[in-house]
Image: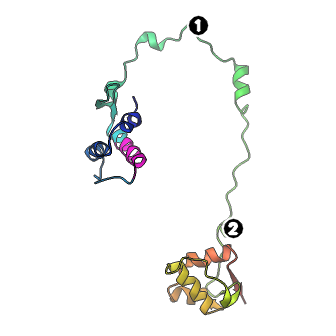
Amino acid sequence: MTNEQALTTMVASTIVEFHNEYAKRPVKKFSDKETAIRRTCAALAEAGMAFDESCQLRKAEALVEPITEAAKAPDSDAEFLSSDELDGLGCNGERGPKIQRRKVEDRQPRTDKDAKVAVVGGKDAANPYREGSASHNAFALIQGQPGITRAEFEAAGGRVRTLTHGLKNGQLRTVR
């Protein structure tokens, strides 16, 4: 029986007890049972513990049967794939095209410290960010001061992440 199967049958308070016994950080409760099972399984695995068939928690290595010499020897009836069959499964030693990383300038729009930024649509454009958020305030700062430089924007406490996000999504533009 796997740890996940055993924990699925338990009530939440029991899962919390197991978690707190084997985890580095104890908890009072979990937000949901899936999270509880996932985190408790990870804690048990890290501690080297596993549930046996009778739902008793034991050291994981005690549950593994020792390999005998008879088990190591292949059966004479065993079927093995021929080299031709293996070639049909794989890529015949060929590799796909090398993965190309994007250039740094392609990852995020870059603005120089003296580049001026304005909102597309001017002062009438709707602020796309949640009211009261840091991004909303940063967008409003640019909207209130069209042509503000990046250096002035940063000095006023604006979020550079909002600036690059707005440039990338076409909500902001650079002006000369």
Tell me the quarter of the picture where residue 88 sits. top right
Placement of the C terminus among the 4 image quadrants = bottom right
Question: Tags 1 and 2 in contact by the CB under 8 Å rule?
Answer: no
Q: Which residue is mark 2?
A: 106
Q: Report the residue at 62% width, 88% height from top.
A: 143
Q: Nearer the viewer, residue 140 or 124?
A: 124
Pick the residue in front: 9 or 52.
9
Query: How packed is label 2: few (under 14 Cα within 10 Å), some, or many (20 or more)?
Result: few
Name the side, left or right, on which 159 lies relative to 41.
right
Q: Is residue 30 above or below residue 81?
A: below
Q: Disc 1 or 2, which lies upstream in sequence?
A: 1
The residue stretch that appears in magenta: 32-43
When asked about the image quadrant of residue 89, the answer is top right
Q: Residue 75: percent from the left, percent from the top?
A: 54, 9
Relative side of 50 to 80, left or right: left
Q: Amino acid at mark 2?
A: Asp
- Is disc 1 placed on a helix, strand or loop? loop
Q: Position of residue 22 (x, y in %)?
A: 28, 43
- Badge number at residue 77: 1
Identify the amino acid type marked 1. Asp
x and y, in percent, of residue 131 in the image = 52, 80
Predominant SS of the magenta segment: helix
Image position of 84 (left or right of 130) = right
